[in-house]
Image (spheres, helix red, strand yellow):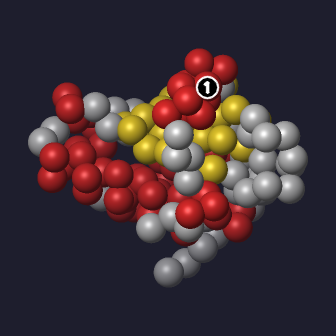
């Protein structure tokens, strides 16, 4: 589970990120990232995960959200502060393993230049 200070909680904040954020795509998910509205770059980055009903039933959607959140949590120290991020799952996420989801999360974060150099799924062994 993500720590409370790393969660986007209000629908207005999520809508702002969705409308104003830069987009990065991967077959498993899409990342929308925008600078935090509160301004201070020292604040930790915050995240939200959204999965449409077309991805699968409630069990599949909840599992997908847990996998994405865990992949984010595993790399929190490597993510630049001061960003609000929304991960939107795509249909391929339904059958994905944790390793695939972690690689997808790292890939889109790296494409958006939010991941420190050298960080990635192989940089943090479990």
Image quarter for residue 100? bottom left
* Image: 35 above or below 19: below
Q: Is residue 4 left or right of residue 115?
A: left
Outermost bottom residue: 126
Q: What residue is shown at x 73% (from left), y 57% (from top)?
A: 44
Q: Is residue 50 left or right of residue 23?
A: left
Question: What is the secondary structure assignment of the residue under circle 1?
Answer: helix
Front-lying residue, 79 or 116: 79
The crowd level at tag 1 (other Cα within 10 Å; few <14, some 14-19, many 20+) is some
Q: Position of residue 69 (x, y in %)?
A: 45, 58
Q: Nearer the viewer, residue 89 or 50?
A: 50
Quadrant for the N terminus in the image: bottom left
Q: Is residue 75 left or right of residue 62?
A: right
On the image, which quarter does residue 121 sit in?
bottom right
Residue 27 percent across, percent down from the top left: 39, 33
Tell me which residue sits at (70%, 67%) in the image. 77
Whether residue 115 is visible, yes or no, is no
Q: Position of residue 96 (x, y in %)?
A: 28, 51
> How many labels were placed on the picture?
1
Q: Residue at x 60, y 41 (%)?
A: 85
Q: Residue under label 1, please give it.
A: 16
Q: Judge by depth and name the residue closer to the eye, 37 or 108.
A: 37
Q: Which sits in the foreground, 70 or 11?
A: 11
Q: Is residue 113 above or below residue 2?
A: above
Image coordinates of residue 19 in percent, x first then y, are 59, 18
Give the farthest residue toward the top. 19
Residue 21 visible in the picture: yes
* Quadrant housing residue 68: bottom left
């Amino acid at each position: 589970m993500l720590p409370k200070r790393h969660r986007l909680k209000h629908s207005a904040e999520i809508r702002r990120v969705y409308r104003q954020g830069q987009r990065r795509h991967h077959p498993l998910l899409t990342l929308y990232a925008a600078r935090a509205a509160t301004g201070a770059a020292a604040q930790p980055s915050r995240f939200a995960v959204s999965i449409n009903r077309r991805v699968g039933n409630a069990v599949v959607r909840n599992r997908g959200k847990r996998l994405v959140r865990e992949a984010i949590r595993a790399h929190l120290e490597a993510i630049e502060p001061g960003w609000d991020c929304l991960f939107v799952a795509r249909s391929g996420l339904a059958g994905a393993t944790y390793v695939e989801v972690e690689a997808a999360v790292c890939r889109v974060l790296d494409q958006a230049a939010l991941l420190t150099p050298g960080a990635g799924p192989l940089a943090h062994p479990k």
